[in-house]
Amino acid sequence: MALNVKEALSIIENLQINLNYEIIPIEKSINRVCTDDIFAQYALPKFDNSAMDGYAIRYEDKNNELEIIDTIFAGDNKDTELKPNTCVKIMTGARVPKNTTAIIPKEETKEKNNKIEITKNVKEFQHIRYVGEDIDLHEHLIKKGSRLNFAKITLLSSQGISHIKVYKKPKIAVFASGEELKLHYEKIEDYQIYNSNTPTFLARAIELGCEVTFMGQAKDSVESIKELIENSLEADLIITSGGVSVGDADFTKEAFNTLDFKTIIDGIYIKPGKPTIFGKIKDTYILNLPGNPLASALIFEVFGKLIVQKLRGSRNIFHNYIIGKMSEPLKNKKRTTVIPGDFDGEYFTPSKKRAPGMVNVLSNANSMIVVDENNDELLENDEVKILPINWKFFTDIKKDFITK
Ligand SMILES: Nc1nc2c(c(=O)[nH]1)N[C@H]1C(S)=C(S)[C@@H](COP(=O)(O)OP(=O)(O)OC[C@H]3O[C@@H](n4cnc5c(N)ncnc54)[C@H](O)[C@@H]3O)O[C@H]1N2
Ligand code: MOO
């Protein structure tokens, strides 16, 4: 029996998955998910140091002439101590001498005969970077299940962590079925169409951090589909499309059933894409999406992406959204509906053409909204929850992005 959207999402949220891990150099960990919480093993800064090239002084001496008693460079290991009416020439990043309570930038001093005079107001403790003000010792730096990106790599390298334990990339196998389909590099007859779904899911799974295998294309026979499924059982997830509705050539379900397929979801009350099937053979999950290209792509965005997040070991297994406004009104029929569209940073404009069988929709859409079955009309300027699809957030319109 078909499930509603919340029920289907909750099943995905609660999937119990055994994840494998590996240890890799941090430079190679971009977009991977870490298996453990990571805590700081060093405070940062490790020692009180200067934020400016200039002079370390005792604050109470600020109005006096100060004798330069030493010079300290970043990386020096000196234990110089400031005595009354002395100062130390210091470079940015160098450890401050004992008793330092202010750093005076070079350009705020006059130097003559190995002495300095301060020419500007001084605040106590100015330009000193204190131990631990950036990172405390034992601070929780990275949460288990976080995606590693350049900024997390900043943290890891600043701690001298060279290798990190990450979950293995999920293995995704993709194939399609349908006698009318030809692969994009094959010759095509007038009565045939190109298989655009398989390359779509291969590309999307790579974008989402998976390792993909293209398994080929099944013919419309139980035997052929069965062979492809059996060949794909090393994968963590098989994504296939087509053959899920009630047509005479829809053999996918039958092929699954001969292979001890355990159904987890059999249909979701959503439009498009109601005839979606999700299940498992042994340890391999199978997402059988509808053949219609837009329907399958949108179902993948709403449900498939979260399955991938689970398989990646990510802690982020829920959709997030941005609030925007409708740029135009929209009618909704009595079904929870996924509407692709374009969000310009303020307004969401539904894609003009969006029939389930179309291919020319998502290349011009950066996001989607999911409209509740009980909401039969959205008006212009109504607030909506916008979920990202292609979300790099650059635009072809030059905008003034400075907050004034
Ligand atoms: N009598 C009914 N007919 C249909 C129903 C229904 O409830 N009762 N549901 C409709 C809905 S909704 C959908 S969605 C489709 C699902 O069909 P299938 O998943 O069985 O897919 P196919 O019949 O194989 O193909 C549907 C459509 O998509 C094209 N297609 C399939 N695979 C690909 C591919 N890899 N690349 C590009 N295009 C593909 C295929 O040529 C068909 O046009 O069923 C409705 N019918
Ligand atoms: O709901 Mo079907 O999945 O219209 O395309």
Image: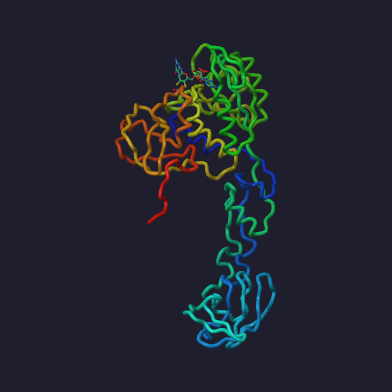
Q: Position of residue 311 (x, y in %)?
A: 59, 38
Task: Please give left or right for residue 135 compared with residue 393 in the image.
Answer: right
Q: Quadrant of residue 395?
A: top left
Residue visible at 64% across and 84% down in the picture: 69
Task: Please give left or right for residue 98 compared with residue 299 in the image.
Answer: right
119 up-or-down from 209: above or below: below
Q: Quadrant of residue 370?
A: top left
Q: Quadrant of residue 232?
A: top right
Residue visible at 48% across and 37% down in the picture: 389
Q: What is the total number of numbered labels drawn onto the structure image?
A: 0
Location of the C terminus (image quadrant): bottom left
Q: Position of residue 45 (x, y in %)?
A: 60, 67
Q: Which of 333/188 is in front?
A: 188
- What coloring was used for the rendering? rainbow
Task: Please give left or right for residue 83 compared with residue 298 in the image.
Answer: right
393 up-or-down from 335: above or below: below
Q: Position of residue 316 (x, y in %)?
A: 53, 44
Q: Position of residue 336 (x, y in %)?
A: 39, 30
Residue visible at 56% across and 64% down in the picture: 134
62 up-or-down from 158: above or below: below
